[in-house]
Amino acid sequence: MKRKIYILILIIFTFTYTKAQQLPQLSQYQLDDIIFNPAALGTKTSDRIVLHHRSQWLGFEGSPITQFISYNGSFKENMGLGGYIMNDITGPTRRLSFNAGYAYNFRITKKMKLSLGLMASVMQYGIDGNKVTLYQSEDPSIYQGYSDRSWKPDVSIGSYIYTDDFFAGLSVMQLFVSRVRLFKDEPFTATVPLVPHFYMSSGYAIHLNDETSVTPSIAMHGTVSSPLQFDINFKGDYKKLVYGSLTYRYKDAIILMLGTVINEKFAVSYSYDIVISPLRKSNSGSHEIVLGIYLKKKNKRGRSLI
């Protein structure tokens, strides 16, 4: 019984504490933006597959590890199709999701388009009791692992205005406001509400010359029950071959990123988060690597992978 009580407390703490931010945090979100805005589907100059890995707060026991594989493609002239698979592990908890989306692009002016997108998702929330380490053990039953999983469907919507040099997006994730129920067959039940998340982003490319550009941008996200968090980013690229960025995440981290394009087929980038919050005393920072694979090019205006 003690183990059941401990696990119940752990579940409530883990999910309730993260209620303000239940979705993974990414530093290179601009390279994989369909994860946070389905309207970004079909808005790029090339269809592509993106592999994304993030190890957050290295050295902190049970720190988040997140992987994505996504596809952003187009269909006909003004439609986007794609989706992603996410695997997110934090301590004994895990989220595994499968997501499929559709977007339609409207032409506003000769250079500007508006995209509206919808993403359908099914996510498995689970806890592995065998990964729970307790400080004290007085009951023999405490070593018996209690684990459970729960599947939940959900929907996200988004809008995205863009030209070759400008973008602005707004999206809402987890619209269903579902409740995750774990250990339904046990004497106790853990119930965790899933709250909607709001994401906003905008940026504009400033061309210094024919080969070099700098793109300042801002991204904001939050929930109805938490303060708005934001990133300020400056990204530069040279000949669309080498690119890098400097990001300030409010009261959390300074992020350095560097990447390159290989043979116009692959884009590889790495970023490092220098933690400036109180957590800096217990970890050595966060690492993130992204591999983009270019597929067919489209004969229409859009934004590049980088």
Image (cartoon, rainbow, N blue to C red):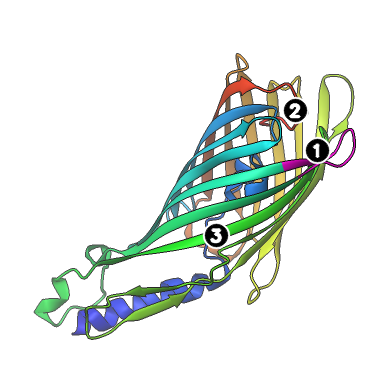
Residue 292 x/y as whole percent: 56, 29
Q: Amino acid at mark 3?
A: Val
> The N terminus is located in which quarter?
bottom left
Element type where label 2 sits in the image: strand
**Left or right of 21: which side holds 13?**
left
Comparing marks 3 and 2, which lies closer to the viewer? 3
The residues bearing labels 3 and 2 have C-alpha atoms spaced at a distance of 35 Å
Tell me which corner region of the image, top left, top right, bottom left or bottom right, holds residue 253: bottom right
> The C terminus is located in which quarter?
top right
Q: Which residue is mark 3?
A: 155
Residue 8 x/y as whole percent: 32, 79
Q: Which residue is mark 2?
A: 237
Say whether residue 112 is magenta: yes
Q: Nearer the viewer, residue 204 or 140?
A: 204
Q: Which dot marks residue 111?
A: none
Range shown magenta:
105-114
Estimate how packed mark 3 is, as few (under 14), some (14 to 19) or many (20 or more) residues with alpha carbons within 10 Å: some
The residues bearing labels 3 and 1 have C-alpha atoms spaced at a distance of 31 Å
